[in-house]
Image (tube, coloured by chain):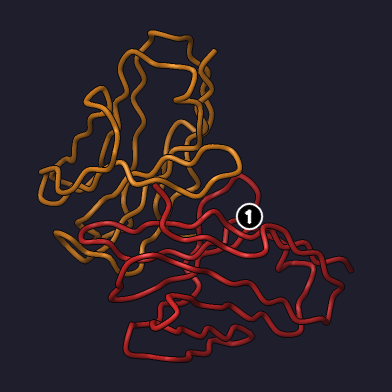
Chain colours: A red, B orange
Amino acid sequence: SQQGEEDPQALSIQEGENATMNCSYKTSINNLQWYRQNSGRGLVHLILIRSNEREKHSGRLRVTLDTSKKSSSLLITASRAADTASYFCATDDTDKLIFGTGTRLQVFP
Amino acid sequence: ETGVTQSPTHLIKTRGQQVTLRCSSQSGHNTVSWYQQALGQGPQFIFQYYREEENGRGNFPPRFSGLQFPNYSSELNVNALELDDSALYLCASSLGGKGYTGELFFGEGSRLTVL
């Protein structure tokens, strides 16, 4: 089963624009992570935010977490064509990560 | 690149056959997890290995089994293949040990097609 649901499922923007994708989950968590996946390849870890944190930054990435609403958002600022990929949120569950369904981001030059 | 290597990268099998997928974890990483990713879906947890023992299992039948070796490398075995087993199989390593749910380092995956 997949706990996280990303929204939107797909997003198309122009280079230079910001991209925002959202993740909702169902149960309490210790941390939430975001991963990126280029087409058909492995996942790359982007950022981890703990349940007692509300916002975290890494380069052009900004992640927020609202545990009361069981939701998180990933903002990519000043997007580039190279940001084209699928983005997944993942929540911890005892001994494993549970991934969402992903947002497919297309950035046009 | 993460340093996690998987083989083979692609393979085709027929229903009822058996398959073995291999994973070498990043240097020093002692924990290996396996995930199945169907087309258009997020990865689904199969199981995790730490100190050569299975530690945690997702909703997969017993025909999915694994091994971890003393050098921390790992194998995923699937018996009696079914069409629905067609997917990208991802291996992920970490330093975290039993029950670790922090950052994972993924390989590029093995894409299995069952005909």
Residue at x-position 22% and y-position 55%: B31
- Tag 1 subunit: A
Residue B91 pos. (x, y %): 37, 46
- Would you say B50 lies left or right of B80 here? left
Q: Which residue is mark 1?
A: A38
Residue A35 pos. (x, y %): 51, 65
Q: Residues within 10 Å of mark 1 (few under 14, many from 20)?
A: some
- Would you say B113 lies left or right of B105 here? right
Residue at x-position 53% and y-position 83%: A63
Is B41 in front, or is A108? Answer: B41
Looking at the rendered structure, the number of numbered marks drawn on it comes to: 1
Indicate the quadrant where residue B16 lies.
top left
Residue at x-position 18% and y-position 40%: B68
Residue at x-position 45% and y-position 9%: B15
Callout 1 secondary element = loop
Is A8 in front, or is B45? Answer: A8
- Would you say A99 lies left or right of A107 here? left
- Would you say A96 lies left or right of B10 here? left
Indicate the quadrant where residue A32 lies.
bottom left
Indicate the quadrant where residue B76 lies.
top left
Above/below status of B81 relative to B27? above
Residue B96 pos. (x, y %): 21, 66
